[in-house]
Structure formats: structure tokens, C-alpha cells
Amino acid sequence: MSQATLILLGAGSSSRFETSVKKQWLYSGDIPLWLQVAQHFEQTGYFDNIIVVSSSEEIHHMKHFADYTFVTGGASRQESLNNALQIVTTEYVMVSDIARCCVPAEMIKRILDAREKAACIVPVLPVNDTLYMDGSPIDREQVKIIQTPQLSHTPTLKKALSTKTLFTDESSAIAALGHKVIFVEGSPLAHKLTRIDDLDKLPCINEPSLQTLTGFGIDIHPFEEGKPMKLCGVTIDVDYGFKAHSDGDVAIHALIDALLGAAGMGDIGELYPDTEATYAGANSAKLLEDTLRRIRAFGLEVGNIDMTILAQAPKLLPYKEQMRNRLASLLEIPSHRVNIKATTAEKLGFVGRKEGVTVHAVATLNYFNWKKSLNGKLS
Ligand code: MG
């Protein structure tokens, strides 16, 4: 088999997917879709290298799942592809979209087997319906539905895409350069995942695992006179607050670390560095909302949270219900899945001396249950 590289494009924003999850991060069993697709191509044994193209935020997370070559995408499909092509050195290159998640191995082989016949090999589907154009029926034998993945001769594709003209696929770019494009039989299984209903047509995607992920977080802040005090997003009526770069909501900080811990996404300092002016006096409730957005984009949902606030002062009992409801509302989960405990330190240590507060938090996450959303939509 001649040398071939696979480029998997996954930099899109999933704007038509109608959920908070990016479609490449839907879970099939206990792995994200992009990884299942990459592993499927890898297992064919046809490729010397696999390049996954995505956003820099996603790549940071993807690297913890597998050791592929990752390239940052651009503003358009073509720009993303050009970024990846820069590092392709094999004679042939196959380009697929992560959203074509169930491409059969036989179809991949059919495309590769035809590699010497043209500069671009394109899988197609016949049109089985009657077609009209401008009010008259047309010969459907002359019409084809173009699919991906397509295989291209690498130097030809690089030349074809080194232009400002935007092409919708590799074959149209190569044809515009005057090179030969040939068609091979495609497959209905190479259907593209665009909307949530498409999941019903893609049998290779398994139901998400029911596994629970657990994370732990801890934070400590000293008191500071004359600053408003925020805890769990609630204003506490005392004349001192917390010394911090942000608003000092020590409970939300511990909670963010617990959530990031469960998601395998690092810690609060990596995401919202206290050296950055953007976060000076930051409203921690807003940071929590941003954390939730990131977690959801990566295919995860909040299960429950629990925390213990260690404080000799102030007295927190009058605020516990309010804090619980505020966190439930910020996390968009029912209050019964949020628990807040408060305890003193029996006058021991810095907490006991009323110098500051410590918070410990635990959070669980589940994989976004796309099956439930799909059933809701289809019923
Ligand atoms: Mg903190």
C-alpha cells in the first residue's frame, strides 16, 4: 500500500446541532466520538499518520485521550485543511470529517485501491428519486451525491488549495486545476452527523456509558476588611470579605476545581489565571457559568455536588438554603442534587482564629445522554 496520511477535520462549531455539546464530543460508550472515528480509521491499518484538526481549546483536552498529531483549525474548512496539509509528507492524503463517523472499512479500501487512477478519488451515491430542474425532469443517472472521505494526490491537492477561491471539497479544487477526478461507490453509512436526528441513522455510535466521573476541589482565602463577602454566589451580611484577585468566592472556587477535576480539565488557575487583568475582581458566579459551558461542550453533565465550608466566622446557617438554591440555579440542576455543609474548626488553626475560610467540594459528572434527547425529539 502506498503511503497515505489521514486528515480528520473536526474544527466546526456544531452550530446546527441544537445542543450544548459539540458533536465530536458526544460519547459513544466511554469514548468521545472524535476518538472512536480516529481509532476506526487507524484500525484499518492503511494510514502512516493520522492528523486531527480541531480548536486549540479542544486539542488541549484531546491530547489526554490519544497520541495523534493535532493541528489547530482555521476560520473555514479549507483553511483548516491547509493548516494540516503543511505537515503531510506522504504521496496520498485522505480527508474526512469527524462528523462522517460510520464510514465502512470496505469503502475506505475501495477509495485507496483506486489511488493511481486519478488525482482525486471521490465516493458517490446514486440518486434514486426523480429529479426536476427549472420545472422539467432531468436524467438522474447524470446526477451524483458527493461524499467524503476523498483521497487526493498530495502535491496536487496542496497546489489546488493554494488559492483564495473557497471550494466545498477537495474534488472541486482539483477539478478546477484541470486534473482528473474519478468516482467510486460510496455508502449510506458515510452519512454526515449534522443534526441530532442524524444519530438515528448512524448505527456505529453506541449509547453513552452510564459511568460517573468524580472530582474534588479545595480552596482557602484569608479575610480582608471592608470588602463585600460572597459565598456560593450569595452576599453575606458582614463588614469583611475575602482577600483575592477575584471577588474571592472561596466556595465557588473549590466547586470549579471539583468540576474540572471530574472532567479531567485541569484546575481553576489554568483556566482563569489570577495573573490576568481580565479576572481582577471577577464575579466567580460568571466563572462557574463559563466552567459549566466548557464541561457541557465536552459532552458532560453535572450529576450532583457536595461541599463543606469550614468557617469559625461568619455564621452561615441563615444562608445555607439560599446558597444551595443559588448554586443549583447556576449549575441548572435541581436543589436536591446540591448539598452544602458548614462547620467550625473548634477554634483550631487559622480557621479557628477567624483568619479565613476553607472549602472542600466534591462533584460528579455523567456523559451527556444524547439518546434521551434524541428519543424526546423523535417521540
Ligand atoms: Mg480561590
Image (cartoon, grey):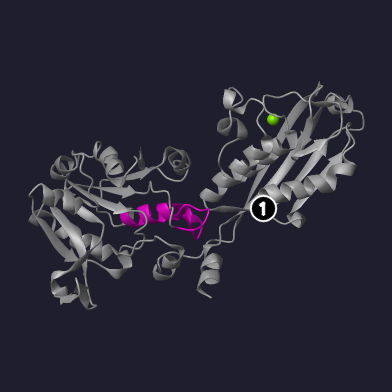
Residue identifier under label 1: 332
Residue toward you, 189 or 116: 189
The number of callouts visible is 1
Q: Which is more toward the observer, 129 or 216?
A: 129
Which residue shows up at 89% across the image and 35% down it? 344
Q: Position of residue 343 (x, y in %)?
A: 87, 39
Tell me where residue 58 appears, x and y as whole percent: 45, 42
Rendering quarter of residue 127: bottom left
Residue at the spot x=56%, y=52% of the render? 300
**Can you give x and y, in whole percent of width and height, for residue 212 in the image?**
62, 55
The yes-or-no answer for disc 1 within 8 Å of ligand 1 is no
Magenta span includes 271: no
Mark 1 neighbour density, 10 Å: few (under 14) some (14–19) many (20 or more)? few
Splitting the image into 4 quarters, where does residue 74 fall?
Answer: top left
Q: Quadrant of ligand 1?
A: top right
Q: Can residue 305 be seen in the rendering of this structure?
A: no
Measured as percent of width and height from the top left, residue 112 is found at: 18, 57
322 vs 153, left or right, is right
Is residue 158 rendered to the left or right of residue 238?
A: left
Q: Camera-side residue: 213 or 273?
A: 273
| Foreground residue among 141 and 263 | 141
Q: State which region is magenta.
A: 17-41
283 up-or-down from 223: above or below: below
Query: Is residue 64 shown above or below 104?
Result: above
Any part of residue 319 in sight: yes
Please tell me whether residue 24 belongs to the stretch shown in magenta. yes
Q: Residue, x 32% and y 53% (percent of image)?
A: 97
Q: Amino acid at mark 1?
A: Glu
Identify the secondary structure beneath mark 1: loop
**Residue most extreme to the front:** 135
Q: Residue furthest right?
A: 346
Q: Residue at x 31, y 55 (%)?
A: 41
